Image: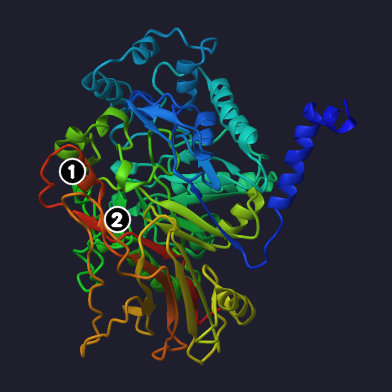
């Protein structure tokens, strides 16, 4: 046997190949690569997911992200394309109880309540168990508590170790990034103020913090501050603001005091990003408050308002929050809501970025795991099935596919989010940018050289800034309709304003005298749930100069790219099962991508 054959027969050679491959794949690209991933996912270590029949472990979830097949609710599921990165973010509340439930030799495993939990059969039994042992313990305004079967802080550490080890096992620099994370599920008075905490590496604390441990976001940030002092690198991502009951972008802190400079500085430091969209709907805008935005009627998730005393206001949506942040900056000197955009699913099925409209099976086990329940029922205490979204997918522009590369892109807000397809979107802003770059490479090079990327701040100037935008369709998806820039600004009187600009569009359409761009058209056949790419464009690139720019007004600018119409998941459900289309539900959607804002501050 030759020396070469001997080498090939050894584990050492396999390891050597993987190292070489990783080094090649991880080579830094100064112009950045687009990477797609998941930042909000629950496995069987989340109690509500386990009750919903989720038996996907953290390790299995990462395997699914990398292309493995699993069966959920009687359906075999596999991503059409593997992800570049993913984070398992199980609820830190009750991961200890789930450790006792799942691991046979764990403390408390033989508790009679946990024996009952492991053997729940009907949906009614599962819902009742959750109410008896979780909601009834933690409802009202008192301090949240562990249920009676909590087996001690040692089980928190043991469960966390399983989650960390799963990420370590599947992280492969340059090929696939497995981020370590968890969810802090703060819900005062039923307001969704949840945050996902993501770490830059595996240097993590011995235990996560939970809503049982600290009951306000300020206390969470102080915990994060202590972790930074201990050498850990972490950031927080607030969840879908549409369920926050007006508390995601508040006027006061958790104690009822007016926001302070310290509050604004702390929040801006620890929370660079916000979740734009997830399975419980789109949080950018709502048609009720943005009637002038012709694309605001998109996955509005109205039925969230049926539960927990929730009701929508403009302040529950990201664009509204960004504008409020400009006002706060005038009084506080710092913008507390200066968020970049990121996406995730919040799937409780354990399947990262399972976001194909034509393969949607819900995200909460039996609650929404059948066509019938998606049509006439829903997720108890949360949302009607018909209002569910497939979720969204996170995008980052990073120098390399490593933990450091992905996390650093999140920290600097060079991120984007799509409603499911793998659309790439990019924007740069600056003075004197070439309004007609030859190609995408030139646009990017000039953007970094003479301007700033998404998530950054424009340099102070009295000269109107120019913005260059680029979007590229999902290679396996629909063509693009247009790219828009949304501008929000606050004037010297403190009044808030916004404007939507159609920057570049497909098919040679001409705006009306009133400046309105005609609709792109619709090729969807509602009898077959098929469409064609006979309209739209594969790539769009353009520029816009803000000729109304006022150097004394704080402002943000973000890009939004829209696809041509395609079938919604509910249309696929209906046609596959010979059922009528749902009344009052859009049969088609225009999937989209949002790029993080570029900011201008007259004070910076």
Query: What is the distance, in whole Å, between disc 1 and disc 2 at their CAs?
Result: 38 Å
- Residue 37 vs 559, above or below: the answer is above
Does residue 443 appear in this view? yes
Res. 496 mark: none
- Residue at 31% from the left image edge and 30% from the top image edge: 365
Q: Residues within 10 Å of mark 1 (few under 14, many from 20)?
A: some
Q: Residues within 10 Å of mark 2 (few under 14, many from 20)?
A: many
Left or right placement of residue 367 versus residue 321 in this view: left
Res. 246 mark: 2
Position in image of residue 458 (x %, y %): 54, 79
Q: Which quadrant of the figure has residue 130?
A: top left
Taking the view exactly as shown, the residue that stands out farthest to the front is 1
The quarter of the rendered structure image containing the C terminus is: bottom right
The residue indicated by pointer 1 is 575
- Residue 48 vs 225, above or below: the answer is above
Position in image of residue 545 (x %, y %): 44, 87
- Residue at 47% from the left image edge and 51% from the top image edge: 237
From the viewer's side, name the closer residue of 46 and 21: 21
**Element assignment for label 1:** helix
């Amino acid at each position: 046997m030759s020396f070469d054959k001997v080498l090939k027969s050894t584990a050492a050679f396999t390891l050597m190949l993987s190292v070489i491959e990783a080094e090649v794949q991880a080579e830094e690209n100064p112009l950045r690569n687009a990477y797609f991933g998941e930042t909000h996912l629950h496995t069987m270590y989340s109690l509500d997911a386990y009750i919903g029949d989720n038996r996907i472990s953290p390790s299995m979830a990462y395997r699914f992200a990398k292309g493995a097949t699993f069966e959920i609710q009687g359906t075999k599921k596999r991503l059409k394309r593997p992800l570049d990165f993913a984070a398992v973010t199980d609820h830190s509340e009750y991961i200890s109880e789930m450790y006792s439930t799942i691991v046979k030799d764990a403390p408390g495993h033989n508790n009679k309540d946990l024996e009952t939990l492991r053997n729940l059969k009907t949906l009614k039994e599962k819902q009742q168990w959750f109410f008896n042992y979780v909601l009834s313990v933690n409802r009202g305004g008192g301090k949240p508590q562990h249920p009676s079967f909590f087996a001690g802080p040692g089980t928190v550490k043991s469960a966390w170790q399983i989650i960390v080890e799963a990420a370590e096992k599947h992280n492969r620099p340059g090929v696939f990034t497995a981020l370590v994370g968890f969810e802090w599920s703060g819900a005062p008075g039923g307001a969704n103020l949840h945050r996902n905490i993501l770490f830059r590496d595996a240097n993590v604390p011995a235990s996560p913090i939970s809503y049982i441990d600290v009951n306000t976001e300020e206390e969470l940030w102080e915990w994060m501050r202590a972790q930074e002092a201990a050498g850990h690198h972490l950031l927080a991502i607030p969840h879908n603001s549409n369920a926050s009951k007006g508390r995601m972008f508040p006027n006061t802190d958790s104690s009822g005091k007016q926001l302070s400079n310290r509050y604004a500085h702390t929040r801006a430091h620890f929370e660079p990003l916000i979740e734009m969209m997830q399975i419980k709907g789109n949080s950018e805008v709502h048609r009720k408050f943005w009637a002038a935005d012709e694309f605001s009627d998109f996955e509005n998730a109205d039925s969230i308002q049926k539960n927990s005393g929730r009701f929508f206001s403009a302040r529950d949506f990201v664009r509204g929050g960004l504008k409020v942040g400009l006002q706060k900056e005038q009084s506080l000197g710092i913008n507390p809501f200066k968020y970049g955009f990121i996406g995730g699913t919040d799937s409780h099925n354990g399947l990262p970025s399972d976001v194909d409209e034509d393969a949607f099976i819900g995200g909460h086990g039996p609650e929404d795991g059948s066509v019938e329940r998606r049509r006439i029922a829903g997720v108890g205490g949360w949302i009607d099935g018909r209002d569910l979204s497939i979720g969204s997918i996170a995008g980052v522009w990073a120098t390399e596919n490593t933990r450091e590369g992905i996390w650093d892109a999140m920290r600097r807000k060079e991120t984007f989010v799509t409603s499911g397809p793998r659309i790439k979107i990019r924007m740069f802003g600056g003075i004197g940018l070439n309004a007609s770059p030859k190609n995408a490479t030139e646009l990017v090079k000039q953007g970094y050289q003479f301007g700033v990327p998404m998530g950054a701040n424009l340099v102070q100037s009295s000269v109107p800034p120019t913005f260059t935008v680029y979007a590229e369709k999902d290679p396996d998806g629909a063509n693009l309709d247009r790219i828009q820039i949304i501008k929000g600004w606050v004037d010297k009187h403190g009044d808030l304003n916004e404007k939507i600009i159609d920057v570049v569009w497909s098919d040679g359409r001409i705006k009306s005298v009133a400046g309105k761009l005609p609709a792109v058209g619709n090729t969807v056949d509602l009898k077959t749930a098929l469409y064609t790419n006979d309209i739209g464009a594969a790539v769009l690139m353009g520029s816009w100069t803000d000729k109304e720019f006022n150097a004394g007004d704080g402002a943000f600018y973000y890009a939004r790219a829209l696809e041509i119409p395609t079938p919604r998941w509910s249309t696929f459900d209906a046609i596959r099962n010979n059922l009528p289309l749902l009344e009052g539900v859009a049969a088609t959607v225009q999937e989209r991508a949002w790029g993080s804002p570029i900011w201008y501050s007259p004070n910076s």
